[in-house]
Amino acid sequence: MKTILNLISIFVLTFFCVTSLSVIAADTVDDGFVSIFNGTDLTDWEGIPDGWQVLDGCIVGESTPEKPCKRSHYLYWTKKEPDNFHLKLTFRLQGNGNSGIQFRSEKRPNWDTYGYQADVDSSLQWTGCLFHHKRAAVVQRGFDNTVDPDGKVHSKQLADPKELIKFYKAGDWNDYEIIADGSVITLLINGKMMCRVDDQHAAESAKSGIIALQMHQGPPMKIEFKNIRFKELNKK
């Protein structure tokens, strides 16, 4: 009887282990996302020397009274310059600062960039907005814009911007998502759509480019990024 019970226990344990591994494998494969930050070092990322570090599984940029950030700079992802994609990451902004995720953008001298940015700031004016270095707000939080080839903007409101910002947890961890599919760009924070734009601007819209993380100049602040996951869309 003891032998039979032992065999049954081994069978049950094996079954649950295999089932658990299958579920983990399915979660990893089926959603199509891949991690682009290993949580240990800055492999596949490139930025200003001593401007970024990896601490506790996070990419960290910081401006302190002892070591202030006097010029904004970016950490480039070096593996791809993607066109259509879905990017997910978790971030935390502390202090009186500004940061963001650059995408479909160009590298510029001195670790700068040019192009689209999924914005976040401590004042909450820009959090959840799509910023552009030349055009400023391509679309504000709470709006769904269409930009004609000649640059004319047609705007409709999705939700009250003041209500949407309540989904953001100031000083705490938040999830940011960027979906860039053709000319349509959608930003979400903590699963809530912040804004959307169909950007057909002939001169300034971009179909592909680098992904980068921003460290903004200014007063003491700290920005952390983790769980950075990427999925190409419409891949042939």
Image (cartoon, helix red, strand yellow):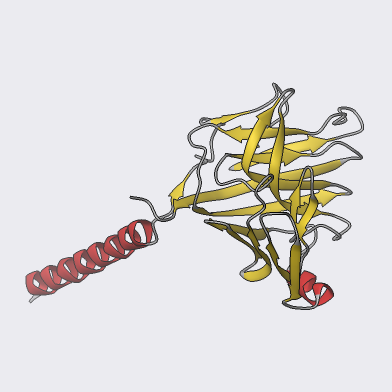
Report the front residue among 62 and 80.
80
User: Image point 85% across, 47% down: which residue?
Assistant: 97
46 relative to 10 in the view: left or right: right
Placement of 2 over or under 90, stated as above or below:
below
- Quarter of the image holding residue 122? bottom right
192 relative to 179 in the view: left or right: right
Asked if residue 232 shows in the view, the reply is yes
232 relative to 42 in the view: left or right: left
User: Image point 54% across, 41% down: which residue?
Assistant: 39
Report the front residue among 54 and 214.
214
User: Image point 44% across, 51% down: which residue?
Assistant: 232
Give how far across and how far down residue 128 sits, in percent.
74, 61
Give how far across and how far down residue 8 sits, in percent.
14, 73
User: Image point 79% across, 69% down: which residue?
Assistant: 165
- Quarter of the image holding residue 191? bottom right
Give how far across and how far down residue 226 sits, in percent.
60, 48
Image quadrant containing the N terminus: bottom left
- Quarter of the image holding residue 110? top right
Asked if residue 55 shows in the view, the reply is no
Give how far across and how far down residue 78 sits, in percent.
53, 31
